Image (spheres, rainbow, N blue to C red):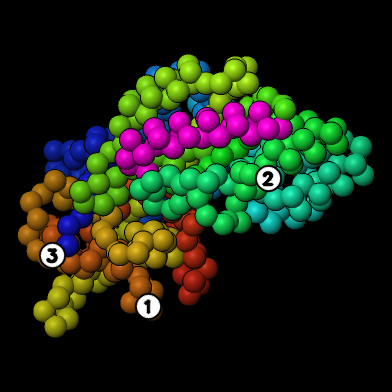
């Protein structure tokens, strides 16, 4: 038996054992949209996360990283809760261009057309290299527009304990910290509208002490670069990296401890950052626990003593739950039988998808209530890096539906 991840707090059953999502049964939600597989996102949960952030980080701007979940109705709701969007492609930019919030554009390999679109739209471009700076300045010169530019910095330290480290080593992300000041001076001298610095060291961190230390180092690094460049940054994006509890033994991040420590760090920041504003960009932490993936059992079989529940969904919709999205050692997400939610487990079963590959594994040797054909499987923590991060065209299976409550 392999343990399941912890179901986020607040999910309950009605009197007949049916999982409620936003006050409605999972079965009713599937009926509402015409069937499964289905991603359900609870806007109230996202709003509660944003409100919690505001209390813990007063005076810090909250940005949403669209790559976590670009579902259009969700973006409309999130726009009411945040201060800016962070995009990583022109298509993402176009999704939020008319929502009236500041936009920053990060990511390596930006095409010339993407750079031109961003310059024309007044988007802040987070430059990932000197070469990207060359191209951006040349395009802006041709257009006769002073571009809004920031320098993404590859820091000499990483975010300890992060699920994915993006600092402290050679990287396609950002300009190495010891070259950043030279690039800043060059941008200012070229007449660009230099916005500041973007420093992102990792993602999916649950250790508050590690995040506190990372943010302290990040503020110090921003001040050092500003001093070397001789220019104070208008803004510093501190990155994000706040994680959520996916797996057994994961403990939720102590957000309030991180917020209190950052307040102390900023109260003591060097004078060159006195008038600098700060932002944190979050994706997974804002929307991850708000999403549930529902998939229906279409077959139940026993093979060599093992029970398999075969569903109409799979890794082509929810790649991360299959363990094929960055896990070094596969572990089970939080999973439940939606129409027997809260019932005592009765048997060890393996939940698989409908694809012709043994990689299509949604819950491995999990202890669950007995489930039959027609029952619904619920996979939690599905609000981030779900449908848009999965190979939806694989084997030409139908795409999943999405629904915002």
Mark 3 lies on a secondary structure that is loop
Residue 268 place in picture, x, y as percent: 48, 18
Magenta-colored span: 205-229
Q: Residue at x 46, y 70 (%)?
A: 397
Mark 1 nearby-residue class (10 Å; few <14, some 14–19, many ≥20): few
Mark 2 or mark 3: name the one nearer the start of the chain. Answer: 3
Observer-nearest of 379 and 150: 150
Q: Is residue 316 left or right of residue 352?
A: right
- Residue 109 part of the magenta segment: no
Q: Which mark is residue 179?
A: 2
Q: Residue at x 57, y 56 (%)?
A: 171
Mark 1 or mark 2: name the one nearer the start of the chain. Answer: 2
Query: Residue at label 1?
Result: 357
Tell me the mark number nearer the camera, choosing from 2 and 3. 2
Is the residue 344 above or below the residue 237 in the image? below
Mark 3 or mark 1: name the one nearer the start of the chain. Answer: 3
Residue 324 place in picture, x, y as percent: 39, 65
Mark 3 nearby-residue class (10 Å; few <14, some 14–19, many ≥20): few
Q: Quadrant of the C terminus?
A: top left
């Amino acid at each position: 038996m392999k343990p399941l991840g912890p179901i986020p707090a607040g999910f309950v059953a009605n009197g007949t054992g049916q999982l409620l999502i936003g006050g409605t049964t999972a079965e009713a939600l599937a009926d509402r949209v015409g069937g499964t597989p289905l991603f359900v996102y609870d806007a109230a949960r996202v709003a509660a996360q944003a409100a919690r952030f505001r209390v813990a980080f007063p005076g810090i701007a909250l940005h949403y990283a669209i790559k976590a979940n670009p579902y259009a109705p969700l973006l409309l709701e999130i726009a009411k809760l945040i201060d800016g969007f962070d995009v990583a492609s022109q298509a993402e930019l176009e999704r939020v261009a008319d929502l009236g919030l500041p936009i920053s554009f990060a990511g390596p390999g930006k095409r010339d057309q993407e750079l031109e679109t961003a310059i024309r739209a007044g988007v802040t471009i987070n430059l990932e290299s000197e070469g990207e700076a060359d191209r951006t300045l040349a395009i802006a010169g041709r257009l006769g527009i002073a571009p809004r530019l920031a320098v993404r910095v590859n820091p000499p330290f990483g975010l300890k304990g992060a699920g994915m480290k993006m600092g402290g080593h050679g990287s396609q992300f950002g300009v190495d910290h010891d070259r950043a000041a030279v690039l800043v001076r060059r941008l200012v001298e070229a007449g660009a509208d230099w916005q500041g610095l973007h420093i992102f060291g990792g993602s999916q961190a649950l250790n508050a002490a590690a995040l506190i230390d990372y943010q302290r180092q990040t503020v110090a690094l921003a001040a050092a670069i500003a001093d070397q460049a001789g220019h104070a940054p208008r803004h510093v994006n501190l990155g994000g990296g706040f994680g959520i509890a996916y797996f057994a033994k994961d403990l939720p991040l102590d957000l309030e401890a991180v917020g209190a420590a950052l307040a102390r760090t900023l109260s003591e920041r060097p004078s060159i950052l006195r008038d600098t504003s700060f932002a944190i960009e979050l994706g997974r932490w804002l929307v991850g626990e708000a999403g549930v993936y529902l998939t229906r059992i279409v077959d139940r079989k026993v093979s060599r003593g093992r029970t398999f529940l075969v569903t109409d969904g799979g890794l082509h919709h929810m790649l991360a739950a299959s363990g094929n999205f960055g896990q070094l050692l596969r572990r089970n997400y939080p999973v439940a039988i939606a129409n027997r939610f809260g019932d005592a487990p009765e048997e060890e079963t393996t939940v698989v998808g409908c694809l012709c590959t043994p990689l299509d594994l949604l819950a491995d040797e999990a202890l669950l209530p007995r489930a039959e054909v027609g029952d619904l499987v619920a996979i939690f923590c599905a609000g981030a890096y779900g449908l848009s991060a999965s190979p939806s065209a694989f084997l030409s299976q139908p795409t999943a539906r999405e629904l915002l409550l």
